[in-house]
Image (cartoon, coloured by chain):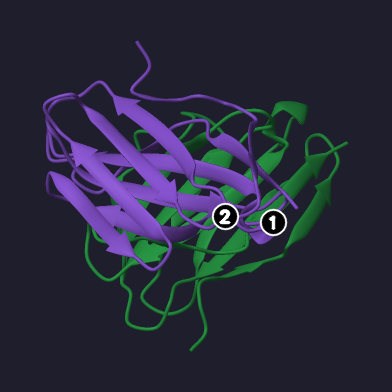
Chain colours: A green, B purple
């Protein structure tokens, strides 16, 4: 009974590189959410996806950030041309239905050097 | 006014005592309320959710919701050192079709002293 799986757990990128964060939802869950937790800050909503659809990306920075949840495979959060301010913990969550109880993965801790 | 407010703590209680964690929210249209526990460096873990006014009990945990006062709390009975963590209050606002977006408070750090 695997939970939400995220990889990598830790990711170090130099400024200007790309970061790709992966998330496989819990079995049976088709709703995926990405949240970001900056140091000393609360969790902030970024994007909500269902298979092949972005439902709400209102929390995503307008530039450099994108997300997808293809028909096959994990959801991907992609950050292009990373900057130091992107350093944070990125958590993926999934739920069985929109607005239902969401369960979080272990997170990817991104460090930009 | 912040959407979801929590006292950052730290809240320190002795082992065996009742820990009381509080949360207020600003949007009266909020419908769903969640408590997550987050150990340092780990992911948030869902421990309770409540949708209706009143109390909801699950083992040593009791969630209390008062929509009129826009207040939700979490009581932890017989606190254990293993309960030491940051407790996050989260709310889903059922307005504008965004009935899936969790809005989190910054969390309250709880320390249970042996």
Name of the residue lying farthest toward the bottom: A1
Image location of residue B67, percent across then percent down: 14, 32
- Location of residue A26 (image quadrant): bottom left
B62 above or below B10?
below
Q: Quadrant of the C terminus of chain A?
A: top right
Q: Which residue: 72% across, 51% down?
A: B41
Q: Is residue B67 visible?
A: yes
Q: Which residue: 60% across, 48% down?
A: A90
- Location of residue A100 (image quadrant): bottom left
**Number of other residues with Cα within 10 Å of mark 1, as a class: few under 14, some 14 to 19, many 20 or more:** some
Q: Is residue A99 visible?
A: no
**Number of other residues with Cα within 10 Å of mark 2, as a class: few under 14, some 14 to 19, many 20 or more:** many
Looking at the image, residue A61 sits to the left or right of residue B26; the answer is: right
Which of A31/B82 is in front? Answer: B82
Image location of residue B64, percent across then percent down: 26, 44
The subunit letter for the residue under badge 1 reads B
Looking at the image, residue B24 sits to the left or right of residue B68; the answer is: right
Looking at the image, residue B45 sits to the left or right of residue A50; the answer is: right
Q: Which residue is mark 1?
A: B81
Q: Which residue: 34% across, 10% down?
A: B1
The subunit letter for the residue under badge 2 reads B
Which of B28/A108 is in front? Answer: B28
Secondary structure of residue under mark 2: loop
Q: Which residue is mark 2?
A: B79
Looking at the image, residue A78 sits to the left or right of residue B77; the answer is: right
Residue B13 is labelled as none
Q: Which residue: 73% across, 62% down?
A: A9
């Amino acid at each position: 009974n695997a939970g939400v799986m995220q990889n990598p757990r830790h990711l170090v990128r130099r400024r200007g590189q790309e970061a790709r964060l992966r998330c496989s939802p819990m079995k049976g869950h088709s709703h995926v959410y990405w949240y970001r937790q900056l140091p000393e800050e609360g969790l902030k909503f970024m994007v909500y996806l269902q298979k092949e659809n972005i439902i709400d990306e209102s929390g995503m920075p307008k530039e450099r950030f994108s997300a997808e949840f293809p028909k096959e495979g994990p959801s991907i959060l992609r950050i292009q041309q990373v900057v130091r301010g992107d350093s944070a913990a990125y958590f993926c969550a999934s739920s069985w239905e929109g607005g239902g109880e969401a369960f979080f993965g272990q997170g990817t801790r991104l460090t930009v050097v | 006014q912040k959407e979801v407010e929590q006292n950052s703590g730290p809240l320190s209680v002795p082992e065996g005592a009742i820990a009381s964690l509080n949360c207020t929210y600003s949007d009266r249209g909020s419908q769903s309320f969640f408590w997550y526990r987050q150990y340092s460096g780990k992911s948030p873990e869902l421990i309770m959710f409540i949708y209706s006014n009143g109390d909801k009990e699950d083992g040593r945990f009791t969630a209390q919701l008062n929509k009129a006062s826009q207040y939700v709390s979490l009581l932890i009975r017989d606190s254990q050192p293993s309960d030491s963590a940051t407790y996050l209050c989260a709310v889903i606002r059922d307005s504008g079709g965004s009935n899936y977006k969790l809005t989190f408070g910054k969390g309250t750090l709880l320390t249970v002293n042996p």
